[in-house]
Image (cartoon, helix red, strand yellow):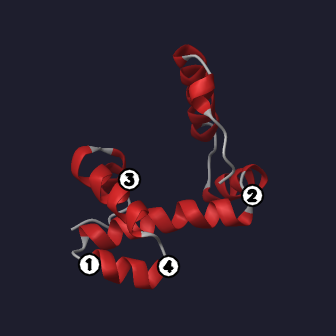
Amino acid sequence: MSRYNLQKLTPKTRDILFNEYCKAVLKLKSVNEVREFFNDLFSFTEFGMLSRRLLAAKMLIDGYTYEEVNKRFKMGMDTIERINKNLNFGKGYKMVLKRLGKGR
């Protein structure tokens, strides 16, 4: 994804931006609407990067090693480690994967 330094924004502005994006996604009513919105919002490469992260998280939950995830997605070890850290200390990946019925 393109680099943009969010640190230059105030925490309040960052929060407003993030909340507006989340509210926009929540307004979508179907997979087709989400695809259309994301096609407009993200480049093909950006969408692929985000999608790969979700699939990598699923593989890690399913017990695959970092090396197996790296081989499958050609993803850097730092990215895989960050995903694994979020699986261990965050809530988002686990919540989404559970709702998709793809967790253990």
Which kind of residue does numbered mark 1 sit on?
A: Tyr
> Distance between the Cα atoms at labels 2 and 1?
30 Å
Q: Position of residue 77 (x, y in %)?
A: 38, 68
Front of the two marks 4 and 1: 4
- The amino acid type found where label 2 is placed reads Asn
The circle on residue 96 is 3
**Type of residue at label 3?**
Val
Image disc number at residue 44 = none
The structure residue drawn at horizontal position 67% and vertical position 39%, both measured from the top left corner, is 4
Disc 2: which residue:
39
Q: If you read the primary sequence from the N terminus, does the residue marked by circle 3 or circle 2 appear first?
A: 2
- Image quarter where the C terminus lies is bottom left
Label 1 packing within 10 angstroms: few (<14), some (14-19), many (20+) = few
**Left or right: where 11 falls relative to 1:** left
Give the residue at x 24% y 45%.
89
In the image, which disc is placed on residue 74?
Answer: 4
* N-term-proximal mark, 4 vs 3: 4
Amino acid found under the numbered disc labelled 4: Lys
Check disc 1 and report the residue beneath it.
64
Q: In terms of depth relative to the viewer, which is nearer, 29 or 64?
A: 64
Tell me whether circle 4 and circle 1 mark residues in contact (CB < 8 Å): no
Q: Determine contact: label 3, label 1, CB under 8 Å.
A: no
- Say whether disc 2 or disc 1 marks the residue closer to the N-terminus: 2
